[in-house]
Amino acid sequence: MKKILVFSFFALMYFPAFAQEDNTDYDLRNDEKYGYIIDKGGKKIEGIVRMNGDANNPWNNQKKVKFVAASDIDKSKKKQKFKTFDSDDIKEYIAFDENSNERHFEMIKYTNTKEGFNTATGGLSGNIKAFNNLTKSTQFAEVVKDGKIKVYKLYGYPTTFAAGQGQIDAADRETQRLKNAPSYIYSKKGGKIEELTLAKAKIIIADCSYAKGKLTSGAYASLKNDEKKRSGLGKLIKSQIDDVMSNVPEIVEEVITDYNENCK
């Protein structure tokens, strides 16, 4: 179903680039949002963003985006001529929904080796998943927390081939996992991008006495360790278990937000 937005005085306040005529109608498809791109030279260009992915294929937003600049809109046509940009073409793209909520994607240099070497299927199917993840050294990632510590959400890419019902079922389960459990990666002060884990979170906030004090006192619920007794083998892999069991999105909202707001 198409959404028809009528540009009133208030709409023009938010999108001045479109203020050519009062009450001008534009047809927006469900995957199209008002927004802008930042080109390689740092120039902001306003227009319409067409998202490449959706809830079923969120990783597609990391590959490319379609965009038409406000200056290129042909008001006499219902369909606009979009250009396709990948992570080699632009630095960022931002899209706003009807409630002015922002989705912000930045070009990053990062290879998702965790998903590249982690496959639920073998043979050609597993090799394709490895290829899909290990060959992407630059891609778009969605910014979920900005500040001194910037956090991105990054989805792994599924396999695109499976043979036999058993492998098909395994690939389907893995694809569902990839949809529901993206990786969270971070960069501190513009430095190297790394995966955010419970163990890493404790390290990167330790340079701030305010955050370190709250960590030491146990004030951060999302950073509390699993204190159950373990066997000798269990103790060796304790940090891995803690990372897997921890709620990284909760760490982002509780700990990283607090750090960015109070540690300068």
Image (cartoon, grey):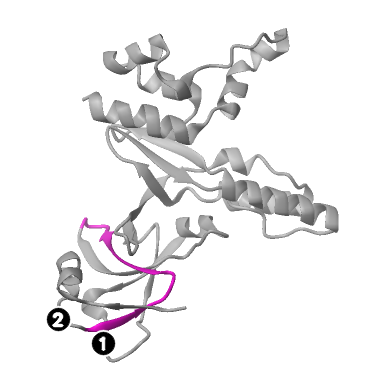
In the displayed structure, 180 sits above or below 81; it is above
Badge 1 crowding class, 10 Å Cα cut-off, few under 14, some 14 to 19, many 20 or more, is few
Q: What residue type is labelled 1?
A: Lys
Identify the mark nearer the N-term, 2 or 1: 2
**Nearer the observer, 244 or 67:** 244
Q: What element carries label 2?
A: loop
Residue drawn at point x = 65 percent, y = 52 percent? 175
Main secondary structure type of the part rendered in magenta: strand
Please state the extent of the stretch shown in magenta in the rendering: 24-42
What is the spatial separation of the Cα atoms under label 2 and label 1, in whole angstroms? 10 Å
Q: Does the magenta stretch include residue 148?
A: no
The circle drawn on residue 20 is 2
**Identity of the residue drawn at 52% across and 31% down:** 247
Residue at 67 percent of width and 8 percent of height: 229
Q: How many marks?
A: 2
Label drawn at residue 146: none
Kindly state the secondary structure of the residue where label 1 is placed. loop
Q: Where is residue 193 in the image (x, y as percent from the top left)?
A: 41, 36
Q: Are marks 2 and 1 in contact (CB under 8 Å)?
A: yes
Of the residues shown, which amino acid type is indicated by label 2? Gln
- Residue 114 percent location from the top left of the image: 59, 38
Query: Which part of the image, by quadrant, shows the C terminus?
Result: top left
| Quarter location, residue 200 | top left
Residue 195 is at least partly visible in this image: no
The image quarter in which residue 49 lies: bottom left
| Disc 2: CA contacts within 10 A as few (<14), some (14-19) or many (>=20) | few
The image shows residue 164 at horizontal and vertical percentages of 85, 58
Where residue 10 sits: x, y (%)? 17, 69
Q: Mark 1 points at which residue?
A: 75
Nearest to the observer: residue 132 or residue 150: 150
Left or right of 183? Residue 84 is left
| Looking at the image, residue 147 lies above or below residue 95 | above
